[in-house]
C-alpha cells in the first residue's frame, strides 16, 4: 500500500439516512461519483453477507476500465455513527490500480452529517507504476473531493449531478478555448508569421515606425502567449474572465479605429471579439455555481 492514503471529508446539512442512501445505492452513487460510470451489485446467495459488485469507469469514448468490489461489512455505533468497508481491484492493465481497500464513515451531529472516506491501493508495473502514481494519486484525491461536493450540492439544493458536471466541464472548456485562442493569436500572426495588418494597426494607434512596430508586435505576441498560460491556473480564471468582459469592447473599438476595413473582412474582428466577449460573460456566470474540491478537507483535522 502507498504511504499516504487518500482522505476526503465534507459536511453535509442533512440526516445520515439520506446520505447513506445516496452513497450506498448503486444507481444513486454512480450519478455523483466521478470515479465510476456504473456500479452493479451482484446477486447474493441465501445467507451470504458479503455484497460483491462490479464497476466500470469510462476513460474516454470507447475505452473503459472495469473492476470488482466487495462490501466487507457495516459497523454502527450507539451514537448513530456508521462505517462501511470495502475491498476493490481490477485485472485490467490499463488501470494503474491493482487492488485496494478503504471505508466510508458517516458521523451524525446537530447540524447534519460528516461524511468522509479513506482508501489506499497497490499499483502495478513496479517502480514505473509508483512514479506514475505520484501524478495519478493527487488526481484521484481531487476527483473524490469534487464528487463529494457534487453529492453535497445534490442533497442540499436538489441540483442533479448531471447538471453540475455539465456546468463544470463547460466552464473549463471555455477556459481551455481562451488559452488556445490567445496562444494562437500570439504565436502565429505576431511571432511566427508577422501579419502586415498587425503592424499597420499598431502604427495607426501609436507614433511607432514600421520597424519599431514590428519589434513591438513580437513582444505583444509573447505577452499573449504568457497570458494564454495563465488560463490554465484555476485561481486566475475567474479574474481573467472578468478582465475580458471589460477589455474586449475596447479592443474591438481600437481595431476598428486603426483599420476600418477589418469590419468587412470575413471572420473579422467584430465577429471574433463579440463571440469571445459573450463567452467571457457566460464563463463568469458559470463560475458562480461550480462544484469544487476546495469544500472538502483533505487531511484529518484540516480546516476547509
Image: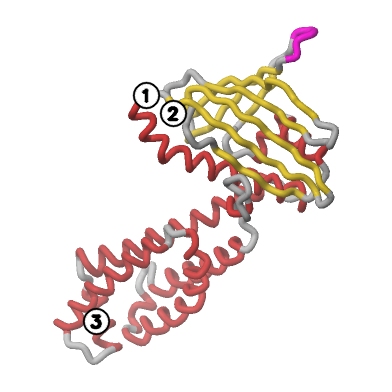
Q: Which residue bears the numbered disc 2?
A: 96
Q: Residues within 10 Å of mark 2 (few under 14, many from 20)?
A: many
Q: Are marks 1 and 2 in contact (CB under 8 Å)?
A: yes
Q: Are the residues flagged by discs 3 and 1 in contact, CB closer than 8 Å?
A: no
Side of 268 relative to 21 (left or right): left
Q: Is residue 234 part of the magenta span, yes or no?
A: no
As measured in the structure, the alpha-carbon distance from the residue carrying label 3 to the one carrying label 2 is: 54 Å
Residue under numbered circle 3: 200
- Residue identified by numbered label 1: 125
Name the foreground residue: 265 vs 250.
Answer: 250
Sequence-earlier tag: 3 or 2: 2
Residue depicted at 42% across the width and 22% down the height: 93
Residue 167 is situated, as x and y percent measured from the top left of the image, at 60, 53
Q: Along the horizontal axis of the image, is 55 left or right of 215?
A: right
Instruction: Let me know if residue 167 appears in the view.
Output: no
Main SS, magenta residues: loop
> What range is drawn magenta here?
45-49
Labelled pair 3, 2 in contact (Cβ < 8 Å): no
Instruction: Classify 55 as above or below 208.
Output: above
Tally of numbered discs: 3
Give the vertical position of 275 relative to 159 (above or below). Answer: below
Q: Residue at x 27, y 89 (%)?
A: 206
Residue 180 left/right relative to 278 = left
Residue 139 percent coordinates (x, y): 48, 42
Q: Secondary structure at mark 3?
A: helix
Q: Under tag 1, what secondary structure?
A: loop
Amino acid at each position: 500500500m502507498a504511504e499516504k492514503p487518500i482522505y476526503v471529508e465534507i459536511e453535509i446539512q442533512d440526516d445520515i439516512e439520506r446520505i447513506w442512501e445516496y452513497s450506498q445505492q448503486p444507481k444513486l452513487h454512480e450519478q455523483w461519483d466521478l470515479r465510476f460510470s456504473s456500479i452493479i451489485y451482484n446477486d447474493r446467495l441465501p445467507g451470504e453477507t458479503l455484497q460483491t459488485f462490479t464497476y466500470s469507469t469510462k476513460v474516454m469514448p470507447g475505452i473503459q476500465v472495469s473492476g470488482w468490489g466487495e462490501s466487507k461489512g457495516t459497523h454502527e455505533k450507539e451514537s448513530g455513527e456508521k462505517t462501511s468497508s470495502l475491498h476493490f481491484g481490477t485485472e485490467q492493465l490499463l488501470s494503474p490500480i491493482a487492488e485496494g481497500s478503504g471505508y466510508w464513515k458517516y458521523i451524525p451531529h446537530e447540524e447534519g452529517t460528516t461524511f468522509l472516506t479513506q482508501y489506499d491501493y497497490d499499483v502495478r508495473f513496479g517502480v514505473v507504476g509508483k512514479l506514475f502514481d505520484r501524478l495519478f494519486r493527487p488526481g484521484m484525491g481531487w476527483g473524490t473531493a469534487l464528487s463529494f461536493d457534487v453529492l453535497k450540492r445534490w442533497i442540499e439544493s436538489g441540483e442533479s449531478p448531471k447538471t453540475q458536471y455539465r456546468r463544470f466541464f463547460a466552464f473549463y472548456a471555455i477556459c481551455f478555448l481562451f488559452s488556445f485562442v490567445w496562444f494562437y493569436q500570439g504565436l502565429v500572426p505576431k511571432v511566427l508569421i508577422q501579419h502586415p495588418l498587425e503592424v499597420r494597426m499598431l502604427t495607426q494607434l501609436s507614433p511607432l515606425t514600421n520597424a519599431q512596430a514590428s519589434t513591438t508586435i513580437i513582444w505583444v505576441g509573447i505577452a499573449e502567449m504568457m497570458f494564454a498560460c495563465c488560463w490554465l491556473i484555476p485561481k486566475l480564471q475567474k479574474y481573467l474572465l472578468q478582465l475580458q468582459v471589460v477589455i474586449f469592447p475596447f479592443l474591438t473599438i481600437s481595431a476598428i479605429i486603426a483599420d476600418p476595413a477589418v469590419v468587412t473582412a470575413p471572420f473579422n474582428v467584430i465577429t471574433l471579439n463579440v463571440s469571445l466577449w459573450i463567452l467571457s460573460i457566460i464563463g463568469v456566470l458559470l463560475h458562480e455555481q461550480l462544484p469544487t474540491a476546495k469544500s472538502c478537507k483533505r487531511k484529518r483535522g484540516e480546516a476547509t
